[in-house]
Image (tube, rainbow, N blue to C red):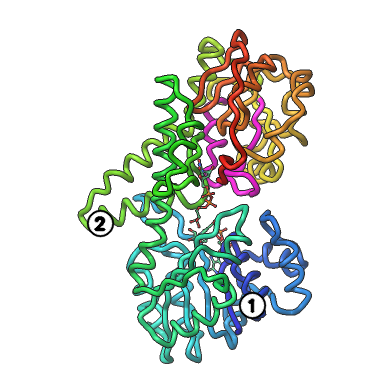
């Protein structure tokens, strides 16, 4: 099939590359000329594990091409994916201007029947709006389908190639057949394609993200309570996660959720509810909890330094909003760093992939170093914000050698408290006991292998 993908961000580029991988001919179009130039030279403009190999293979086999011209990109296309940004507007509503602008352009460019697919996360009613925009200038037949994307950054290729489900919102039999054909290679293991009306498909995407955000905020509140009552959130997580009705994923307490999706999608769903005279109380709480959680480590750090952080040198491990990505949109690290800078600290940061992006917005307000250990040189404390695999099993003697003091604030519960006691660190994490330098190693708690839970 000949496919056009409009927008080559995390979703567009992964979508285009994965459809090329299954034998389609894909043209990706983006208004960012620099990005398109890079891609034409074979350079992947984002960091996404596994994307580069697939990208290169499909370019070499002539199935993946790039352009800045929409009219060239849609030449002969049977389907056109819109993978454009839908950032939050001032009132929290998703900004549809990118989508509607392209829809209007498509109206005067479409010559034959084509299916236009909303891949972006868009509020209920958008498929209708896109249809109206295209129809303003278009005389030929077309359909608009809602096909929300559920991939996660960092594991985007796997999520796209083996989705838990595919959601397709359409009332057109012709579009439905085409979409089923397109997705057939991705649902060969029996994972379902859910066909529904456009509105339900649009709402499904927000409901999924809001539910996951709710799980995280719930666990963060449980963690905060754990600290007050002397319980351990990891134990509680395992205790509830093995109940199949609850499920063991997305129950990790930490410094809150970030990224380009949860924060904006929760806001947009609240706004949709408000516009329909419905007060979505639980989601307001989910947001409020997350706002507090992002800087929950600050009072702990301040308290340790007896209220005065002026001139303290703080090492930060992890800047990306989650591991295995270079994406820093709404990253908790940015909130933590800004709060620490406001207290007069000196920040030395390391992240395996996201430093270039942070440099663009923070410039020389913080120092960037090339490896995790250099960040610790003369540091008064280490703050762990993103749980990159390399941070989980560090060389502790090397860390101790470099640090001014053995002090760790762990926003992702990367280390075991017992281990910290044995090593003599002052260690504060989320929803677990505070380890002070006088803490004595206790009885080891063994967690059996089958209890290791995938995030
Ligand atoms: N990032 C994710 O993990 C993810 C997952 C599922 C859904 N989504 C949703 O998918 C959509 C896209 O997200 P993203 O993270 O890929 O965004 P992104 O910001 O990474 O990429 C968007 C791309 O669109 C391009 N663009 C803007 N206007 C254009 C135009 N007129 N013509 C062509 N290209 C144009 C931009 O230059 C950019 O390259 C959003 O609605 C988002 O909520 C994102
Ligand atoms: O138990 C958990 C799981 C995640 N997070 C945080 O939640 C945020 C989002 O993580 P994740 O969902 O893994 O990443 P995204 O790439 O933002 O993916 C989400 O947002 C995408 C965009 O809509 C959807 O497609 C995905 O299904 C949805 O998981 C990150 O800051 C994580 O650190 C936690 O704090 N605890």
Q: Is residue 31 visible?
A: no
Asked whether 395 or 334 is in front, the reply is 395
Asked whether 60 or 232 is in front, the reply is 232
Asked whether 300 or 160 is in front, the reply is 160
Question: Which residue is found at the position 41% from the left and 53% from the top?
Answer: 265
Q: Which residue is mark 2?
A: 275
Say which quarter of the image contains residue 95: bottom left
CA separation in Å, label 1 and label 2: 38 Å
Asked whether 406 or 439 is in front, the reply is 439
Residue 26, disc: 1
Residue 342, disc: none
**What's the magenta region?**
315-340
Relative to 396, residue 35 above or below: below
Ligand 1, image quadrant it occupies: bottom right
* 165 left or right of 225 in image: right
Relative to 390, residue 1 above or below: below
Label 2 CA crowd tier, 10 Å (few <14, some 14–19, many 20+): few
Q: Position of residue 203 (x, y in %)?
A: 35, 62
């Amino acid at each position: 099939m000949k496919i056009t993908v409009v927008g080559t961000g995390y979703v567009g580029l992964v979508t285009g590359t994965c459809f090329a991988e299954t034998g389609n001919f894909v043209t990706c179009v983006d208004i960012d000329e620099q990005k398109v130039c890079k891609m034409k030279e074979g350079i992947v403009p984002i960091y996404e594990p596994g994307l580069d190999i697939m990208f290169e293979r499909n370019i070499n086999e002539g199935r993946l091409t790039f352009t800045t011209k929409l009219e060239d990109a849609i030449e002969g296309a049977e389907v056109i994916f819109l993978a454009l940004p839908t950032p939050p507007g001032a009132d929290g509503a998703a900004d549809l201007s990118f989508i509607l602008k392209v829809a209007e352009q498509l109206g005067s460019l479409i010559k034959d029947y084509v299916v236009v697919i909303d891949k972006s996360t868009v509020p209920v009613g958008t498929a209708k709006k896109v249809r109206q925009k295209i129809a303003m200038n278009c005389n030929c037949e077309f359909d608009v389908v809602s096909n929300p994307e559920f991939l996660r950054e960092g594991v985007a290729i796997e999520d796209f190639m083996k989705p838990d489900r595919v959601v397709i919102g359409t009332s057109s039999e012709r579009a439905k057949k085409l979409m089923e054909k397109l997705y057939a290679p991705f649902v060969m293991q029996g994972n379902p394609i859910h066909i529904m009306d456009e509105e339900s498909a649009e709402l499904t995407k927000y409901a999924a993200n809001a539910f996951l955000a709710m799980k995280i905020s719930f666990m963060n509140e449980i963690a905060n309570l754990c600290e007050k009552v002397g319980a351990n959130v990891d134990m509680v997580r395992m205790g509830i996660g093995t109940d199949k009705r609850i499920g063991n994923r997305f129950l990790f307490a930490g410094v809150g959720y970030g990224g380009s999706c949860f924060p904006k999608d929760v806001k947009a769903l609240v706004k949709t509810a408000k516009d329909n005279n419905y007060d979505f109380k639980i989601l307001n709480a989910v947001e409020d909890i997350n706002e507090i959680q992002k800087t929950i480590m600050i009072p702990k750090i301040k308290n340790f330094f007896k209220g005065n952080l002026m001139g303290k040198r703080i090492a930060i491990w992890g800047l990306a909003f989650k591991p295995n990505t270079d994406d820093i949109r709404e990253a908790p690290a940015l909130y933590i760093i800004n709060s620490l800078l406001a207290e007069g600290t000196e920040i030395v940061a390391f992240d395996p992939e996201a430093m270039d992006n942070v440099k663009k917005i923070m410039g020389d307000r913080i120092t960037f170093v090339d490896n995790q250990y250099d960040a610790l040189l003369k540091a008064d404390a280490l703050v762990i914000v993103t749980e990159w695999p390399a941070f989980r099993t560090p060389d502790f003697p090397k860390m101790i050698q470099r640090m001014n003091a053995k002090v760790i604030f762990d926003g992702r519960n990367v280390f075991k408290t017992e281990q910290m006691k044995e090593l003599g660190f002052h260690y504060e994490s989320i929803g677990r006991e505070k380890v002070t330098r006088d803490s004595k190693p206790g009885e080891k708690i063994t967690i059996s292998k089958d209890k290791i839970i995938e995030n």
